[in-house]
Image (spheres, rainbow, N blue to C red):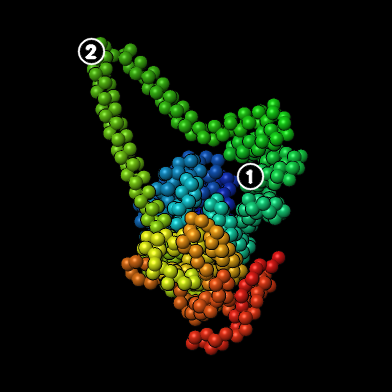
Amino acid sequence: MSLKKSNSIIRIYFLVVLICFFSVFGFAQNQKVADSLKKIYKENKLTGEAKLELLRNLSFNEVNDLKLSLKYADELIALSKATNNYLYLHRGYLQKGNTCRLLGDLNAALDVFFKSKDAAIHADYLPGEGTTNMSIADVYSVMDNAVNAQIYYNKAIYILRKTTDTVSLATALLNAGEEYSKGKKYEKALLYYKESGALFKKVNYLIGTAYNLGNIGMLYAELGKDDLAMSHIKEAIVILEEHEDYYAISDYLTYISDIYLKRHEWGKALTYAQKSLILAKKYGLKDQLSNSNLKLSELYQKAGDFKEALEYFKEHIVYRDSVNNIEMVQKMADIRTNAEVSQKQVEVDLLNQQKKTQKILVIASLVSFTLMFLLAFGLYRRYKFVHKTNKIIEKEKNRSNALLLNILPEETAFELKISGRVQAKRFESVSVLFTDFEGFTTYSENLSPEKLVESVDYYFSKFDAIIEKYDLEKIKTVGDSYMCAGGLPYPSENHAELIILAALEILKFVEDSKNDTDFNETRFNIRIGINSGSVVAGVVGTKKFAYDIWGDAVNIASRMESNSEPGKINISENTYELIKDNFDCQYRGEIEVKNKGKMKMYFVNKRLN
């Protein structure tokens, strides 16, 4: 090899590295980058990891021709297999999965993402394993499989927290928050969004910050907090305009239109919907062309202009059908073209053959057709069997996941599934609640077992619903005693306020139940006790798992309950200091507590404005 040729290859290699650096670490696709790299690809002078990196970036940045992107990804996969390079095999499968998803082939994308995950594990590449779990979750989210989506988002977050890949962790948190928002779990979604936004700002990743702001804005819109929604969405649009991300801008403009429509400001609502449509037309955003036309149709319908509403609705149908059917139309066109070419060729062959040859060809064609029909029928039967089996497996898997999440908190369940064990964790600030029915033991002696279970279930079922409403964690029940906690497994700043609100609602339910004629025989008074402090939480047992908490804070909460009075909520001084500004409390003085001496106690009367 001549020196001149050697220097040329070195220059090409550094050019690839430079372009790849900006494309990969910029985290934004760029067709201009792909066009620049094509020249290097055609020269075919790179080898080893330089060529693998070139193929990776060609596939990533090729946005105009997704089939070409798929070709680069397949070439990257084949070359990675040939060189036993599992890191780039993971990257090749990941890129292929992303492209399949853009093409609308979700089943193929899911299959390829699982292969990418296996390659990342084989390469011992933790960031890749976390990112692939996030991609799998994204596909399940699009499929509206919320259970699986949440499982894989939590796997991704669990793994990415062990890495330094801040952008991927922030993205996983953002997507998981969006999934919770879809399920109307807005408080949990907001927690994920806030952590995600802080991480994006930490690394100054503006696109991520923009999407984070936009998602928070859409969440506030769902909650009816229109001013907050508007300010967040507009801030997101400013950043997205600088980065020319018009798809998201078009989407957010329709949300702003919705907000103005709710305010009965029809003119402004129309202006923003029209802006969304203009952007969608300018940049060929078919999803948004459909959505924007639908929004304008709705606006004109509300204004009583049914003729204009019909025209926009027709456009919505055209673009909706275009998005849904374009791939099928292309496939049908290819089949039709191939059939016509084949037919012409057959006609030419038939004209050039003698009668004997014609007869042989006809027989051969019939035999081939029969064999192909049998093969196709066999493959169809196999497909139906595999599809049916996969649905059964998926159903049972979802059922087992749902059962596990019913027993353990989400984070604990995922840790148990991933590592086979759960590490005990210390929580510095939680609130613990105990309840107890007055005279239950004496009363239960005169009840049948069936009636006893019915009575307890009547109360505890409602308690479960109340603590879920306030995002608390049920710990256990022992006889007629009910125990729950706030501030775990996800730490929160307002756990004491939430648990007091839940206690007030429990107290009201018990009081209201006394007037319920269906349960006249099972009316009880209830005592409630609450304390705040640090605890240790973990899983007890190896067969029948039980999530439990320990510590002095738990013991004191139990003492607060035993020193309470029927129809009262008794709290410790620790809890009082956390909630005193928001609740009306009555000081009881210092009361002797078993093994603790004298302790200050308070009754909670009601919530302040």
- Of the two numbered discs 2 and 1 in the rendering, the one whose residue sits closer to the viewer: 1
Residue type marked 2:
Lys
Give the structural element (helix, strand or loop) at label 1: helix
Of callouts 2 and 1, the N-terminal one: 1
Res 251 label: 1
Residue 305 vs residue 448, the one in the foreground? 448
Q: How far apart are marks 2 and 1 (CA)?
A: 66 Å
Res 356 label: 2
Asked if residue 561 is positioned above or below residue 138 in the image, the reply reads below
What percent of the width, then of the height, locates residue 588?
Answer: 62, 81
Do callouts 2 and 1 mark residues in contact (Cβ within 8 Å)? no
Question: Which of the image's four quarters has the N terminus?
Answer: bottom left
Residue at left 76%, top 42%? Answer: 265
What percent of the width, then of the height, locates residue 572?
Answer: 58, 79
Residue type marked 1:
Asp
What percent of the width, then of the height, locates residue 62?
Answer: 53, 45
Q: Quadrant of residue 304?
A: top right
Give the structural element (helix, strand or loop) at label 2: helix
State whether residue 558 appears in this view: yes
